[in-house]
Image (cartoon, rainbow, N blue to C red):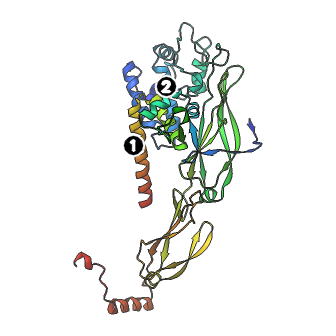
Amino acid sequence: MSTTPKQTLTGLILDEDCLFTLDEMSIACSVRTEYIIELVDEGIVEPTEQQREQQQWSFTGKNLLRARKARRLQHDLDINLAGAALVLDMLEEIEQLREQLRRLG
Amino acid sequence: MEFRDYYEIMGVDRSATQDEIKRAYRKLARKYHPDISKDTDAEDKFKEMGEAYEVLKDPEKRAAYDQLGQNYKDGQDFTPPPGWDAGFEFSGGGFEGAADSAVFSDFFESLFGQAGFTRGRGQAGGFHARGQDHHAKILIDLEDAIQGATRMITLQVPEVDQQDHVQTRSRTLNVNIPKGVKQGQQIRLAGQGAAGMGQGGTGDLYLEIEFKPHSIYHVEGHDIYLDLPVTPWEAALGGTIKVPTPSGIVEMKIPAGSSSGKKMRLKGRGIPAKTAGDFYVVLKISLPDADSDKAKALYEQMKNELNFNPRQKLGV
């Protein structure tokens, strides 16, 4: 069974330009806000103005994706936050190296 | 329905200890985690082993599965015998936050779906959970990123019907691919994921953009690169040459004395964005074949009249 689409949907590109509040981050990741704060403490995500009140923090779309990834890695591989942070950073580095390889290849 | 051999999936012996099963799972999980592995079927493999582990890690479920499965092979046609689970007590615990858990196969559902642990639909005493997020990749052409496009995508969505059976339904969406998307970027469609439970909100749909390889261009971020063949005299003497770009042919001046590999920029002619990308032309000097008397004579003339040693710096 299939339904025909009635309308064309427009999404949000998760880049440096779109911003999310602490609450929006926690909803998008299905976690408590405390978890997002832990991610900030671990340096996995960085609010644009960290010195401000937590309720005024905003995070870029890239941060949102990192937070979701951190949670998946932690949940699925049973690793702690420091481990997840390391994996995330190394994955990013691998991606950059792959990109360089493609350029040279 | 096909029988699934969970031991084969996890690559362990039927006699494996719980510790061995856990180790095997950890190893496989690191290898096939969809965030880590580049395997195209990593996600399927990861789900498959997650399901296998869900059963084998739990001694009660494992015992029931063992008794049932001793005469079956992987892929064999299978119907669960009525009342097969009598005498087994599933204390469950496996599903932590039902909406969060993976969607398992029909095989799993038929065995463990109804017994003991429910999938936590609304009736379980005010249980609320946010619907699952969906994730899909869409392949687009470079031209789509430049002009924007509309894509029809079809998702396979698992749904729980009124008889508590999980069924897959295909759902088709029209999605705008906005101008200026980059390779690897994700687009979030809020509320287009799975329905939540109780008062839990609907999940979101994440679309990951992937560019199809282009026959002549390659893309880095918002920049577009083109390897452009030029003749030795164009490179040496300079001149105006035609350059294909995704938005049409343009003319470009090459300075005299250009070397192979020289990179030239056409500002703002990359993928449009807040800061538009640039178009880079990389010159590749192409040599004419010495396949006629005339061509040979011209090469001979250069050899005799130009005092050129490209290996001077190498001291030879």
- Mark 2 residue type: Ala
Q: Quadrant of residue A78?
A: top left
Residue in front for this viewpoint, B316 or B184: B184
> Could you give the CA–CA distance between mark 2 and mark 1, rounded to whole angstroms?
29 Å
> Would you say A33 lies left or right of B247 here?
left
In the picture, the quarter occupied by the C terminus of chain B is: bottom left
Position of residue B151 measured from the top left corner of the image (x, y, whole percent): 68, 49
| Chain for numbered disc 2 | B
**Image: B191 above or below A14:** above
Position of residue B250 measured from the top left corner of the image (x, y, whole percent): 59, 74
- Mark 1 residue type: Met
Q: Can see residue A105? A: no
Query: Which one is closest to the eye, mark 2 or mark 1?
Result: 1
Residue under numbered circle 1: A90
Q: Secondary structure at mark 2?
A: helix
Q: Quadrant of residue B30?
A: top left
| Chain for numbered disc 1 | A
> Would you say B313 lies left or right of A38 here?
left
Q: Residue furthest left?
A: B315
Residue under numbered circle 2: B52
At a point 43% along the width and 72% down the height, the residue shown is: B262
